[in-house]
């Protein structure tokens, strides 16, 4: 084996070849390395998530049976194992500490760290396996509906669902970040013995790894190679009003006028789905919205932005269906009757991965919405929500859904962002129900989907929002009060709504929404049953006692406006999350890596939501390394300890760091 030369350096990449496999390790961004591998063929160009990024001064060292490449804080060591000439890659930080290592082949076991299994048609099912470190903690990976922060031991589906956003990037407590740069449907297993990534169908292996001394360094390196969020518009900093659903023009205007009459600040009023005749029409239904331009104008005069819901479904009966089908602008089913979702009719999805589709749909929305003065959109159903989620059935312009399906929500956001940009708009934020790596650069504000109105779901959202921030999505929100099951007259639900509202005040965007009960059926003039309208969901809908608390917290959100704007600037310029795990601010504090129900709103506020029914106090951990001031009482506490604090319904525990934001003392 000593006469063989397995390694070479080409175009600033380290390349290994053996028995049909080619592996390429490329410095990518600061402190980052990109690893690609192909079987029977050359490494393909293109990237699912990574943008082109300049690396530092890379250092290569090549021997006959081993080689290294260093880029800033990270070094990869590639070694040919004596049994079967299998390649093993190990990653180290600048201190020489092992961060991550592919599995060895195990000698006679002949295991494969990069296992390509051939599929009909030329693709592969791929499994990439790494050694597990039992003391490691893992965070990120998008949004999964579970009350779990440390993902070690979790099995996660790499696919989107309503309320689930799979973003395959995690931050490790060992000091590295890892991106599975592959949009295929698959799964990951963070086991105690190995970590295994599986792509159901792909052409090659592709992942990226970075090293950092702090979570912030890791996050900022990741943002540099996947893109930054734009600067949040001013209308994203205040309170947003929504419900399922304001079904006509007069209902929309009466709610806005009431907010104005009561002197309650309101930045955005949202018009939900089925304001259109059929899915895929992308316009107002004249029966219920006879003069939408005048409606938008009146709202604008009140200082309120109008947001409208968009669905990517196209009903067979839509006025655009035949043309879109003829032009090849729709997602296709591989066999059988082409119905991809059944809801108020047979629907198929527009193909957001097709640039011609993006141009077509934006032109409809420009004419029917943007030209009326509407500047912000609610991009619902973004997974997309196939009725059965059988991804093997569907095909996009970009490829089979099993191979590229997870990129759909990002391309959906891109459709509107690029259209709005071309239309001359710069202050862009669009609400969307799903995301993938890179969605942030297209103005995507992700919300956590159609969750239930329960205390358990409330707690899950705290975890979901923190994981999303670590996954590179700084703009995140949730339906305050939950979506399904809230009965407005129920005292238990009113308590949940108040506690959720308090949490929402300290989220990146503060938005109330839900399918409140009891609902009212809607039938149009032709006798057709339309989508229902839920019970009232305005802040005065829950009684005077609740209204008083909610008004107080809208006022607090307004007082936070300058501070929130500064956090949005950090997200825009560096990629920092708006809401942050305690360990993001205090990485040297072991207790901060364990906590699931506290977080930092930027660097200055520690938020401890009250998320258990009937609770009027809670335990709070105050991290070491700071002095903490209770924003309600002004009492000061040394960090590094647990305390028990009162939490009556009208407030929640908020602590100010090292005397900062002192103007909030006594306000909560």
Image: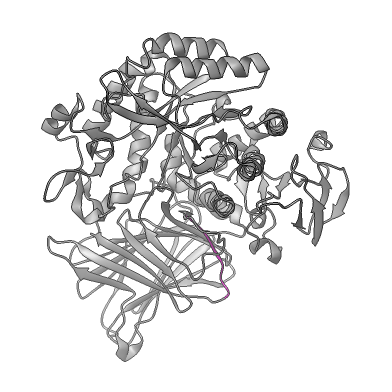
Q: Is residue 259 left or right of 87 when viewed as pictured?
A: right
Q: Which picture quadrant has residue 634? A: top right
Q: Vertical placement of 583 versus 369: above or below?
A: below
Question: Which residue is at a point 60% across and 17% down the rendered structure image?
Answer: 258
Q: Is residue 608 left or right of 641 when viewed as pictured?
A: left
Question: Which residue is at a point 63% across and 39% down the rendered structure image?
Answer: 501
Residue 441: % across, % down: 44, 38
Foreground of the two, 353 or 31: 353
Residue 652: % across, % down: 74, 45
Foreground of the two, 563 or 630: 630
Residue 225: % across, % down: 44, 48
Q: Can residue 34 be seen in this view?
A: no
Q: Is residue 645 visible?
A: yes
The segment highlighted magenta reads 135-141
Question: Which residue is at a point 36% across and 24% down the rendered structure image?
Answer: 275
- Residue at the right extreme? 635
Q: Vertical placement of 76 versus 572: above or below?
A: below
Question: Which residue is at a point 13% across and 31% down the rendered structure image?
Answer: 327
Foreground of the two, 112 or 634: 634
Q: Which colour scheme is used?
A: one colour
């Amino acid at each position: 084996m000593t006469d063989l030369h397995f390694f070479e350096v080409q175009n600033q990449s380290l390349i290994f070849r053996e028995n049909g496999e080619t592996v390429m390790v490329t410095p990518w961004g600061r402190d980052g390395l990109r690893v690609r591998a192909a079987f029977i063929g050359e490494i393909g160009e293109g990237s699912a998530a990574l943008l082109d990024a300049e690396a530092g001064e890379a250092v290569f060292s090549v021997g006959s049976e081993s080689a290294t490449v260093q880029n800033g804080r990270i070094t990869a060591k590639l070694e040919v194992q004596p049994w079967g000439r299998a390649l093993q890659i190990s990653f180290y930080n600048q201190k020489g500490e092992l961060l991550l290592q592919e599995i060895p082949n195990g000698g006679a076991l002949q295991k494969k760290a990069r296992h390509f299994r051939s599929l009909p048609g030329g693709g592969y099912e791929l499994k990439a396996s790494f050694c597990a470190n039992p003391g490691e903690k893992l965070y990120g990976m998008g949004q999964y509906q579970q009350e779990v922060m440390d993902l070690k031991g979790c099995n996660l589906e790499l696919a989107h669902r309503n309320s689930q956003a799979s973003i395959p990037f995690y931050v490790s407590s060992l000091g590295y970040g890892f991106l599975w740069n592959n949009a295929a449907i698959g799964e990951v297993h963070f086991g105690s013995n190995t970590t295994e990534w599986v792509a159901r169908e792909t052409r090659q292996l592709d992942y990226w790894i970075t090293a950092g001394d702090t979570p912030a360094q890791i996050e900022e390196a990741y943002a540099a190679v996947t893109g930054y969020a734009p600067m949040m518009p001013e209308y994203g900093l205040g309170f947003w009003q929504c419900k399922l659903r304001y079904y006509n023009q007069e209902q929309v205007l009466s709610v806005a006028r009431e907010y104005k009459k009561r002197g309650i600040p309101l930045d955005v009023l949202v018009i939900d789905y089925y304001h259109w005749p059929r899915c895929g029409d992308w316009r107002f239904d004249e029966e219920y919205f006879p003069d939408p331009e005048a409606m938008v104008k009146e709202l604008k005069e009140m200082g309120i932005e109008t947001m409208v819901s968009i669905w990517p479904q196209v009903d067979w009966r839509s006025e655009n269906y035949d043309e879109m089908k003829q032009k090849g602008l729709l997602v296709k089913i591989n066999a059988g009757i082409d119905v991809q979702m059944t809801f108020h009719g047979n629907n198929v999805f527009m193909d957001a991965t097709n640039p011609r589709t993006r141009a077509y749909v934006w032109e409809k929305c420009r004419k029917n919405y943007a030209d009326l003065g509407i500047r912000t959109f609610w991009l619902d159903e973004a997974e997309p929500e196939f009725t059965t989620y059988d991804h093997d059935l569907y095909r996009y312009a970009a490829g089979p859904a099993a191979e590229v399906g997870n990129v759909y929500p990002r391309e959906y956001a891109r459709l509107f962002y690029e259209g709005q940009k071309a239309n001359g708009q710069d202050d862009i934020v669009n609400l969307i129900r799903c995301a993938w790596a890179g969605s942030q650069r297209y103005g995507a504000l992700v919300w956590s989907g159609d969750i239930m109105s329960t205390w358990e779901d409330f707690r899950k959202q705290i975890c979901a929002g923190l994981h999303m921030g670590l996954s590179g999505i700084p703009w995140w929100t949730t339906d305050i009060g939950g979506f399904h099951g809230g009965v407005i007259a129920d005292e238990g639900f009113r308590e949940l709504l108040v506690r959720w509202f308090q949490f929402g005040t300290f989220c990146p965007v503060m938005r109330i929404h839900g399918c409140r009960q009891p609902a009212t059926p809607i039938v149009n003039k032709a006798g057709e049953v339309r989508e229902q309208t839920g019970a009232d969901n305005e802040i005065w809908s829950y009684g005077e006692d609740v209204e008083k608390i909610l008004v107080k917290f809208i006022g607090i959100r307004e007082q936070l406006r300058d501070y929130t704007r500064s956090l949005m600037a950090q997200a825009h310029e560096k990629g920092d999350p708006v809401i942050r795990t305690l360990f993001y601010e205090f990485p040297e504090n072991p207790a901060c890596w364990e906590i699931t129900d506290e977080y930092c709103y930027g660097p200055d506020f520690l938020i401890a939501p009250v998320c258990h029914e009937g609770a009027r106090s809670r335990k709070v951990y105050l991290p070491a390394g700071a002095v903490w001031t209770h924003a309600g009482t002004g009492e000061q506490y040394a960090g590094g300890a647990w305390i028990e604090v009162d939490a009556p319904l009208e407030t929640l525990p908020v602590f100010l760091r090292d005397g900062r934001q002192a103007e909030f003392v006594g306000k909560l």
